[in-house]
Image: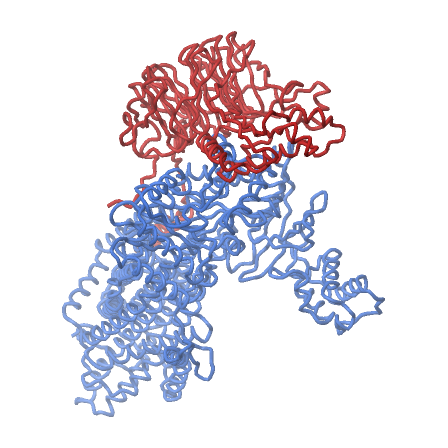
Chain colours: A blue, B red
Amino acid sequence: MEENLPESAFSMRFGRLIMKYRFATLMTLLSLALFFAFPLVNAAYFNFTAQRSETGEGKLLFGSPARFRMDANVRKTFPEHPYIHAQDKFAGKFGSASTIAIVAIKKDGEIYDYDFLEKVSRITNKLDEAPNVNHYQVRSLTHVNTRVMTIQPDGAIEATPLIEETPEDPQQLAKLKDKVLENPGTLYGQLVSRDHRACFITAGFITQNLDNREAYTELFNYLRNLKAEEEADGTAEIYISGAPMATGYVIDSQFQIVYYLLVTIVALFFLLLAYFRRLHGVAIPMVAGLATSIWGMGFCAWVGITLDPLVLVIPLLITARSISHTIQMAERFFEDYEMACKAGERRLGRALSAEELEAAKVETATTAMAKLMLPGMLGILADAAGLAVCFLTTIQTMRDLSIFGSFWVVAIIFNVIMLHPIMISYLPPPHDFHHFTPAWMQRFLAATGRIATGPVSKRVLVGGTAFGLVLATWYVLYHTTIGESRPGSPVFWPDHPYNVATGKIGETFGGVDQMTIFVDGDGKSASSDGLVLQRMEAMQRFMKRYVDVGQTVSLVDVIKQYWLVNHYNDPKWGFVPDSAQTIGGIVFQLQQNSSPGFLRPYLTDDAEDANITFYFRDHKGTTIKRAVHYAQEFIEQNPMGRINVRLVQDRGEPLDAAYYLVGPVLFPRHSQMTVQVADINEDQKITGYQTKRPLPVGKWSDSVNADEVLTHVAAALQAQSRTKLGPLTASEGFKDLGFDAERLEKVAEKLSADHDYRIETVDRSAADAMARFATVGELVRYIVERSKFYIDEEWKTDEGNITAQTIRYCRTYCGYELWTRNTKFNDKSFNPQRTNTYTRGAEFVLAGGIMGVYAAVNEEVERGHVANILLIFLICYLFVAISYRSNIAGLVIVFSLATATIGSLAWMAWRETGLTIQTLPVQSVGVGVGVDYAFYTTDRIRQEYSWLGDLDEAIRRAIRTTGMAVSFTATTVIGGIVAWAFSGLRFQAEMAQLLSILMFVNMLGAIYLVPACFSIFRPKFFAASLSEVTQQHHLGNSEPLPVAARAS
Amino acid sequence: MSTLGRMRATRALILVLAVAFVTSACSEEKYEEKFAEGQIDLPDDLYAVTAIGPDHLWAAGYFGAIYRTADGGKNWKKLNALTDQSIYDISFADEKNGWAVGRRGFVIHTTDGGDTWQQQEIPRKPAQHLFAVRAVDANTAWAVGDWGGRYYTGDGGKTWEDRSFLVGRDHPSFKYLSEDELAAFERGDKIYDDIFLNDVFFADKDHGWMAGEYGYIFRTDDGGQTWERGRIKGTVHFDDISFPKGERKVPKDRWEQIFKAAEVLAERPYLKVEIEGYLTTDELAKRKDTFLADERADEIQKFLENEGINQDRIKIKHATPLDQEGVDMKAFARTKIQAEPVVKIEVIETPFLFDVKFRDPDHGMITGLGGVALTSTDGGRNWEYLKTGSKQAMFAAAFADSKLIAVGEKGLRRVSLDGGESWQKLGDEGGYGRFPPEKHGYFRDLTCGTPTVCWMVGQGGNVLRSTDAGTSWYEMLPKPEQVPATGAGE
């Protein structure tokens, strides 16, 4: 039974205020909508002018950069993770994680055919000319860098290109086949398939240039044309795979996305029409959805966020949520409007006049808003919280989603809760105040109410759900995959050209997914040392032994081949020599006698850094986890540096859990700087390691005093000045004092040496950094400002040539960093070690390639999933527990949420859908989305109980009334997104299915589980609210009707 | 519900939630190893094989790999060789006692068929690679290797004697020693010969042979007490090239003679030549020096180089010294005088030899670089070239019943049914016998445990077995699951 809220209640006062100033409010909301619509118009104008422009450049309205953009930026999907830092560090040296792999399969016979080899050559050349390609990362049978090292009968060694001119006659072709067969490590099975029917062509691309839709589209179209051209003669099949191609396909499917959006809108329209059967019920939710979308999209543009097409399902869901809340409001309005009109007719004994109907409409709209404000706001805030917790990841795309998603949800407060009664007030009263409810739904909900309150059935329901929850949890724990769970890309269906191509490459050449382990040297020739290369080889073998690796490629293979050839081709000499000098000689020979850049895929020109590339057949989460696990194990067991400095974060309960959950928003964790020094024997071999005392890091040093700094700066300037300087003030310019860049650098060095004032930054040397300062005061301010980032921990070698320091440094996040200086190489500056490790000599650093990216993302996703779900549960619990002052109510709601969440996770595990960066927000939002059903039900039970005083009856009535709205809301939202289940993008389809399941289970939770729990536990807050609300009821002026009468 | 009942129910609900969520943080990933102890994990390149009887076989190779079968190849075990360095050779005297040798003077010994190994020390610093070992009996073994390394044990390896080849005053390399090496020599230090000894073989306790770089072949009849150099019978001789008097240019009618010589050299890459020019008394009297002779030799060298013969294979012999201070030039000139002005091309036959095997104390075969195969019927005193028809390196040979089988680089395999007179390809289309078609890498060693049961090993852990004296070969290793099955397919 219904009660009216007292006029003194906040929600009533707020409702009256809004309605009193409804025109002003409407104009304000309209203005805001226009403000947020501007970037959308700007985007349309830009695209329109761009299409008409010869240069392809569009124009902006009023020159405003606020333009809505939907685009893919791969780099933004990478988390803040040591692997990504390592990739950034080495990207300029070895290329990037963006690789394109092409397999050309000859339809009939072997590849040793002039026309086919010409085709392969053309593909190679075209790939080499593709936009943003890294020319040093092109591999193909016909590429000039594909060389064969041969020993002439007289002992001469040659590294000649395998194919200089495409062979034509059968003898030459047979000779080519022989050469391929003779080189199983580099050609046979690697560039030519084992059945001689396919060629493998790969190229690396510059990731930092692939940061926008235009770049991807250009590359995607280029490759698609290449495929079409080379397949046109019908002699070959061309398969193209690789991360840039996947992104290209996603961008290419934008038309499809628009199509599904339209389908969604149409579906929602008809569902609303079918349920409400009147203009109000259709127009108002649609307007609310549109307004919310405009706010959300506009907000993205104004704050400079680009919408990623892959996370589009979230904004779509939010929009559906706005419609969902509108339905709740509308449902309540129609219900109360009917009640108010009937009461009025009874009181007056006649039909109501138009004016009376109008007055009843406005009043009911106001009270309906006030009544639903608490559960509505709780639901919206829970939705917003679900998105807000995504901010805990370090993935920029997720953080962006968290920011704009939360705003988008909060916009529902304005565009639904506030706008709804205003729109009702301006629309004519409904012609018929009788509220339509299907009879079969009434029967269904009546049965539901009986089950939820039946003495046995409610216990069976709750007990069975609890048992199911435990079972599902067990299943989730042991069967859920973090990361992709299938080969190929889960974004696409198995028969999508991308997955077909990826599968074909895996089948033909053992995989396209690569992981690079870097060898990070501390100076010239650090990576061309015998020990380092032997460790590299040992690692390649170790990984092959423990992990399912396809191919491995490194400098080791080149050196072994050279050494063997250098010794009469005797296989016994196919090993890596011990002496660094010998290897240096080999590297020099190969650099001099081979084509330019021959060694660059494996070794930098100065031999400081090297790498090992592992090719995998798939990038399943389990494959990556195993690869990382064993790579780390090998590195731990096989140190190879002479001095190893590590910055290791403190571990220990209970902070581990806190940092695991909300680490990205906490202060950087205290760390230890550990130092290992190698014991070297007479042969200069490492025989063991001494571990030095760990140095604790995390004590804050006080900011330095500005006057003191000025004194120090002045002293340093005076010491480095050519002329004798008098007392210096902050305003004096360096140029006036006669300081050039060279001398300023010396000043910086002196300040660094005497006082630990470091001037250089991550990106600039001390000399460059100094050039930015014009006056003494600017330099002093910089030092004072930066001093708080510095930590005093420092370690030096006995000889003093290596200094390691830890620094608190803030980039995207604040953290401790290791900076080192090695004066042995005449470099006096401190260099940041982005991986927080430093080795004198060389060390292995994880991990590059697409597998390195996935490894980092998966770790983040694993943490994020647990953290997000637990946090959102906690938030929901607190919302409910505080709002109703009841622990049990909080626990019951969380129980219901957990059932839906764990159930959906179990469904994902069963469907072998891995938890990925894309599923992360869906899960979080899904929790928030579901909870408001439970809020509405709980609130209704409370309100009904206040009238009836019988909890079970209150529950049954709540199910029959609010349960109806909940069921309809859920089915409408599900109906709206279910079309996406048939999307050509598998990811969107599965996410739509996942969300549908989440909402359906949450709906069941709201009408079965939550009421049954309340019926069993009978929390006190219902009784507590009885006297209070009953009192309020008696203050009200409406006459309640029996539920049965209302339902009819 | 009573207060107590409500408390219980609340606790039960909390328990369910706790079980559901808290345990999620406690799950830890467990990794199972792909391979069990003793299982062959990665198919390593194999360099050596030794067999006792038809069933017992040990194969050794890269990264400390030693694989053993005791049932003719049905079951295999990877043995713990105590190293991750290459093992170059392995030899067993019987089913229990054997040695394996490898990089940097690595030696291990077993007395239990390879289940356990003990490392042994070679008395030489710095350690040099050991390329071959031969177990003569349970206590006696010989090992050879880099830098003239030759070692002997008669006590099961407890002590190894260094019997390496040394450089003495009468050694051709003595004159090339550096000052430090000469000083060391004068002090009585050992100066080792810079030569690879690639293989050692004993037919019985007394009769043994070794082979290596520069045509080094040695034989012993007394169990290694004394060693005698074997002689390779030369097969190539070039006539002198005559010049018109006073002329340094090669006359046109001699060009054909030089081209033919170049063809022969190109065909036989193991041959080197030394070229020496001569002049007549009249020419000497007219020129007052012997440089004309050198110029003629230079001309011949240019011709050969133009025909593609690498300069490393051509040496100008006995050229006129540029710095003539302290040199008796009259005496030197006398050595350059001939009745007719000619250039002599002397052929040096120093093949690089990989492998030596003997069927019995008299009949042996050696294989080497450039398709070289040598045979001896007098216990290794004299050796003659066999026409194998290949330029590819032959790494190993074996006597299988009445057949000769040889294997080598790039999948090379040959068989001779007539004692080496003629050779056929093994298993190829139109060739002899059966051979798995997809075996393209090198085969580095070959052995027969009985006259009919033979084995070959090579690249990528390939082990093949024949039970019909080398006619049909079957793959034993790697097992099919270790071979990447990749191909475009249908």
Residue A404: image quadrant is bottom left
Of residues B142 and A1007, the one drawn nearer to the viewer in this rendering: B142
Considering the image in quadrants, where does the C terminus of chain A appear?
A: bottom left
User: Is A107 rendered above or below residue A564?
Assistant: below
Of residues A1004 and A37, the one drawn nearer to the viewer in this rendering: A37
Can the viewer see residue B56?
no
Of residues B327 and A649, the one drawn nearer to the viewer in this rendering: B327
Residue A497: image quadrant is bottom left
Left or right: A654 in relation to B424? right
Can the viewer see residue A876?
yes
User: Is B418 rendered above or below residue A515?
Assistant: above
Considering the image in quadrants, where does the N terminus of chain A appear?
A: bottom left
User: Is B58 rendered above or below residue A771?
Assistant: above
Q: Position of residue A401 (x, y in %)?
A: 41, 66
Q: Position of residue A288 (x, y in %)?
A: 32, 78
Q: Position of residue B458 (x, y in %)?
A: 40, 29
Left or right: A778 in relation to A241? right
Left or right: A278 in relation to A597? left
